[in-house]
Amino acid sequence: MQPEQSRYDRGLDTMRAIFGPGIESTLKGLAATNPDLARYLVEFPFGDIYPRPGLDLKTREMLTVAALTVLGYAQAELKEHIRGAMNVGCTHNEILEIILQMAVYAGFPAALEAVKTAASVFGEE
Amino acid sequence: MQPEQSRYDRGLDTMRAIFGPGIESTLKGLAATNPDLARYLVEFPFGDIYPRPGLDLKTREMLTVAALTVLGYAQAELKEHIRGAMNVGCTHNEILEIILQMAVYAGFPAALEAVKTAASVFGEE
Amino acid sequence: MQPEQSRYDRGLDTMRAIFGPGIESTLKGLAATNPDLARYLVEFPFGDIYPRPGLDLKTREMLTVAALTVLGYAQAELKEHIRGAMNVGCTHNEILEIILQMAVYAGFPAALEAVKTAASVFGEE
Amino acid sequence: MQPEQSRYDRGLDTMRAIFGPGIESTLKGLAATNPDLARYLVEFPFGDIYPRPGLDLKTREMLTVAALTVLGYAQAELKEHIRGAMNVGCTHNEILEIILQMAVYAGFPAALEAVKTAASVFGEE
Amino acid sequence: MQPEQSRYDRGLDTMRAIFGPGIESTLKGLAATNPDLARYLVEFPFGDIYPRPGLDLKTREMLTVAALTVLGYAQAELKEHIRGAMNVGCTHNEILEIILQMAVYAGFPAALEAVKTAASVFGEE
Amino acid sequence: MQPEQSRYDRGLDTMRAIFGPGIESTLKGLAATNPDLARYLVEFPFGDIYPRPGLDLKTREMLTVAALTVLGYAQAELKEHIRGAMNVGCTHNEILEIILQMAVYAGFPAALEAVKTAASVFGEE
């Protein structure tokens, strides 16, 4: 099955805008185990959804930080998206406000886990 | 235990701004079973968290729509917050974009359940 | 496969102690669709786990009310266990305290859903 | 944005094979609120994922029944997929075995909720 | 915003009673990233909820061990609360009974993850 | 309480068939902390459920890989069951297809976490 170039290219551009140029080696790592998941990740979330008009990239990244805080088990993805949120204009303070608000909707453990992840991202800078 | 008036009053003002004046009868219904949960709901989420600077009410409501879509089981709360999001400036389209994006993070069933809830809110208008 | 009488009988006795004699018609309803799930439900949770020494039935029911509040989607089971908790000695107040505490660990929507379920049980009395 | 005909058509064919011809009115209902979610649902899960070689449709539907039983909150989607599983060759007994096994991985409440949904589907036949 | 001394002080006293005097350095670590989350954690769960009459601290810690076992992703918080539960009078056996019972409500993987966490706490003593 | 030999023996045979002979030392490790959970794990999932007719072991392991991918927090159990799935006849490709399909039902983060776990298992071979 030939990748659909336009969705893939649009997705890769969106991922570069959010995650920076390092995203291509991350995708290569994923593709080594599951090339089709890597391709769908580029095409569907970042090729179809994120580039849609209606919400800008910064708002989308903020929503994703909220979603991953609620899920709780996906700290690796949360780490990437905290970095991504900052790349598209979120401040540390905005990220911490999002996480804090999630204590209301998913409980304090979800917020505490996410704060540790945020601290590890902020500490790398 | 005497309610701390300033947090409670700030919370009630925030809830009126988000949910409209009907919120007081909703709170009375909740207080009939569990007055302390009703009070904490006013004081902590809406008295402490929502009025914080750093994120405006519209952004906070968008994050909450995302969170409740991810949780999946809290459609009654999602319904209130879709109404609330519209009251503080969200368009139908923005709400649908948030729900659509959550298909990426919590799966299509979460998005499909939330879209039905959104449709029922939109249909009431 | 012949049901193991001792575990089954112990489980049925425990279920009667918690849920009252009406449990047998509930089990018949379940058995009409899935007799083996009905049998395992009697044997494993109520035949093996609940009768164990170390925690009394009231404490076990309180833990279960907490667990079902956190899960969020299982309000029908929560309703049965709120009734069960009261049958083995929990007061309304204790049940509401458990639900309130779960706002800390699973968020306010989980607590709000559970309070509605508790109110519907209390209202039946 | 013009729907990509080949993915959409492949998805619609897959959905007809699983859910029967009634799926088109279900999709129209969804599209009335959120046409893009309806389109992505056809294109990504049913256009991209389900038609992939490696697992046949019956196995995929069995996996989906397992997944929706674990999620717990998506009984409407579970209902559709129990019907779908039967359309592609699952017996009642296989569906009940899947649900029963999920008691091990997601607990008895998840299995009990799913059994009620299965019973309502079986009762319609 | 000035911390409300009475809720904060009551919360800190409760946390010291549950977690021991080491809690203040844990809170300092959290406050380094998110001082307001640290403050709300003291004020709301431990200042408002835990000191309420109706359930004693030991019962509250048992409920929290149940809740965190069900959540699954918050093993760091579970570790703290297993220690806390022992500080307020839970035996190893009671903690293991709680975890075992959660296999019924959240599945065996939740119980297995929690048992590993309990084993690591017991091994430190 | 004397273990019920027939369920226990059947469960141990099933576990050996799925996980290989190393399972006995894994069970000993678990039994060191919680011998009754170890015993119930053998008796209920593997003594009662897995050996039932209606679904073969390979199908059951595929369903379990799906369930654990959806749960998200139980990567240690997922690792064991990916190994187990391969022992009873699943190919790498089938395991990756299951995980990929779960992106539809539980979101991309769940699939990404599971793919990393699969990669670590495949890398050990």
Image (tube, coloured by chain):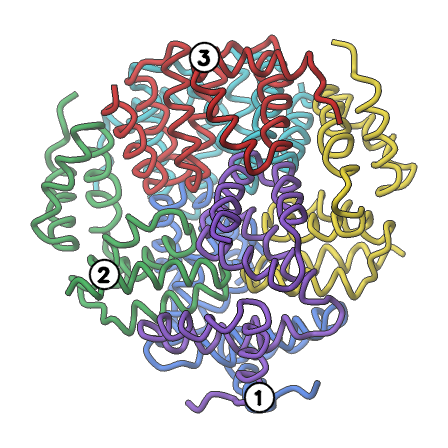
Chain colours: A red, B cyan, C blue, D yellow, E green, F purple
Q: Which residue is mark 1?
A: F6
Same chain for labels 3 and 1? Say yes or no: no
Structural crowding at the residue carrying mark 1, measured as other residues with C-alpha within 10 Å and reported as few (<14), some (14–19) or many (≥20) = few
Badge 1 marks a residue whose secondary structure is helix
Mark 1 belongs to chain: F
Residue at image coords 57%, 60%: D109
Q: Which residue is mark 2?
A: E121
* Residue F109 percent across, percent down from the top left: 51, 35
Which circle marks residue A58 in the picture? Answer: 3
In the image, is F34 to the left or to the right of F14?
left
Same chain for labels 1 and 2? Say yes or no: no
Structural crowding at the residue carrying mark 3, measured as other residues with C-alpha within 10 Å and reported as few (<14), some (14–19) or many (≥20) = some
Mark 3 belongs to chain: A
In the image, is E4 to the left or to the right of C13?
left
Same chain for labels 3 and 2? Say yes or no: no
Residues at marks 1 and 2, CA–CA distance in whole angstroms: 34 Å
- Compared to E84, does D21 lie above or below? above
Residue at image coords 70%, 85%: C1
Residues at marks 3 and 1, CA–CA distance in whole angstroms: 60 Å
Residue nearer the viewer, D50 or C70: D50
Residue nearer the viewer, B68 or D81: D81
The answer to which quarter of the image holds residue C61 is bottom left
In the image, is D59 to the left or to the right of C102?
right
**Amino acid tagged 1:** Ser
* Residue B85 percent across, percent down from the top left: 51, 19
Residue at image coords 53%, 56%: C123
- Compared to A113, does C39 lie above or below? below
* Residue A53 percent across, percent down from the top left: 60, 8
The answer to which quarter of the image holds residue D51 is top right
**Amino acid tagged 2:** Val
- Contact between marks 3 and 1 (CB within 8 A): the answer is no
The answer to which quarter of the image holds residue E46 is top left
